[in-house]
Image (spheres, rainbow, N blue to C red):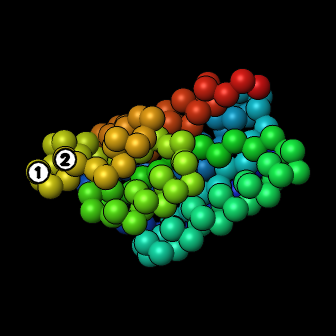
Amino acid sequence: MADTASLTKSSQEIPLGNYQTNLSFIVDTPKQKAVKITLIFFQTNNESELLNLIHAQFAQSLAAKAQEQCINDFYVINPAAWGHYSVALRDALLGVQAKLVEVHLSNIHQREAFRHHSYLQDIAQGVICGLGAKGYNMALNYWLDSVSW
């Protein structure tokens, strides 16, 4: 695997509090653990773009595994509102047998009742909510700790 991290700019506005939206601090985590990984950051307001990325990444991983390259795909996903209603996102993640940790910046259980349920919570290895952007780092650390290097 590559020892670089790819970053894309996020334009998503987060109206609930003062959350850090610059995720560049996450890139330092693998360096601190001295591992070689590729991080792909992706933000979109278009659900079909996210679904296409999930399927494209799965196809790329299958091709790499066919060439006997060591590939492990782990997802750290903040589905935002899609977590509350998107069966398509759930089906896509199930279809590619995604290993995922669901992250929400706000505590969804302190918000409106319809936000208390997520269509991903029962297929995720874990759910982190209410800890702001630190949740992303916690999820990445979970995956880094779960792999035998």
Horizontal and vertical percent for residue 34?
77, 28
| Proximity of marks 2 and 1: CB atoms separated by less than 8 Å | yes
**Residue 3 — which label?**
none
Distance from disc 2 to disc 1, alpha carbons, whole Å, reads 5 Å
Farthest residue, direction right: 67
**Element on which disc 2 rests:** loop
Q: Which circle marks residue 116 in the picture?
A: 2
Q: Where is residue 68? Give x, y as percent.
A: 87, 45
Residue 59 visible here: yes
State the residue in front, 116 or 14: 116
- Tag 1, which secondary structure? helix
Residue 89 is left or right of residue 143, and the answer is left
Q: Residues within 10 Å of mark 1 (few under 14, many from 20)?
A: few
The quadrant in which residue 59 appears is: bottom right
| Residue 7 visible here | no
The correct choice, above or below, for 95 with respect to 124 in the image is below
What residue do we see at 57% from left, 62% from top? 54
| Residue pointed to by mark 1 | 113
Q: Looking at the picture, does residue 38 appear above or below residue 51?
A: above
Residue 107 is drawn in which quadrant?
Answer: top left
Q: Position of residue 20 (x, y in %)?
A: 44, 50
Q: Residues within 10 Å of mark 2 (few under 14, many from 20)?
A: few
Residue ID at (57%, 54%): 96
Determine the residue positioned at 67% across, 38% down: 28
Q: For the C terminus, which image quadrant?
A: top right
Residue 70: x and y in percent read: 81, 41
Q: Give the residue type that dot 1 points to.
A: Ala
14 vs 98, left or right, is: left
Whether 97 is drawn above or below 84: the answer is above
Residue occupying the point 43% across, 72% down: 47
Q: From the image, which quarter does the N terminus lie in?
A: top right
Mark 2 residue type: His
